[in-house]
Image (spheres, rainbow, N blue to C red):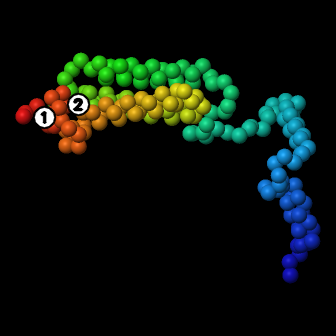
Amino acid sequence: MSNRDWERELADIDRRLAAVPDPGAPTDAVRAPAAPAPPPDVSRRGATPTPGPSRTVGSVAPSGRRSWRAQFALLFRLVLGVAAVAALIYWPYSTRCGVELGYYLGLVALLGLVGIATSTSAWRHRSSVVHLLGLAMLAGALTLAAREVLPKVGYAIPSLAHPASWSCTP
């Protein structure tokens, strides 16, 4: 036999269960407001308040205003992506074959990475407009890459501007 007082332990469990709100209860029930937590005791010299919840890598930024650094980083990524889109739309070199095609597709891949980084950062900082623009950059990168790659793999109809060969030889 154990020396535990089961009546007292079961009463303690019942008391704890009574303190937990019922998940099936209607939401419009009037509840008493919770008492605010007492401030930490820092009256003693050298005492530090207990830390709050710690932020981990990949966690979402708290709601409210973003810091100026976060705002600057979001806008910098956005401007970088817009500049890359403009540069790729008005690409002055041939993208038919060779090294020029490699440079072009490399910048398209960079635009895709900037779009992903912008969307991810904007998601964490709860900036919906910048998030959508980052996704638009990613979609633009995929479109520009498909315009060059699909005719060369035989999926799309080749044209003079987008030939079916990867090399410069006919």
Q: Determine the image quadrant of residue 16.
A: bottom right
**Residue ID at (31%, 31%):** 144
> Mark 1 to mark 2: distance in Å?
11 Å
Q: Nearer the viewer, mark 1 or mark 2?
A: 1
Q: Return the residue found at the far bottom.
A: 1
Q: Is 128 placed left or right of 78 in the picture?
A: right
Q: Secondary structure at mark 2?
A: helix
Indicate the amino acid at tag 2. Gly
Q: Is 68 placed left or right of 48 in the picture?
A: left
Q: Position of residue 124 (x, y in %)?
A: 57, 34
Determine contact: label 1, label 2, CB under 8 Å: no
**Residue ID at (87%, 48%):** 29
Q: Is residue 166 visible?
A: no
- Residue, disc 2: 102
5 or 73, nearer to the observer: 73
Up-down relation of residue 94 to residue 55 (above or below): above
Indicate the amino acid at tag 1. Ser
34 or 153, nearer to the observer: 153
146 or 45, nearer to the observer: 146
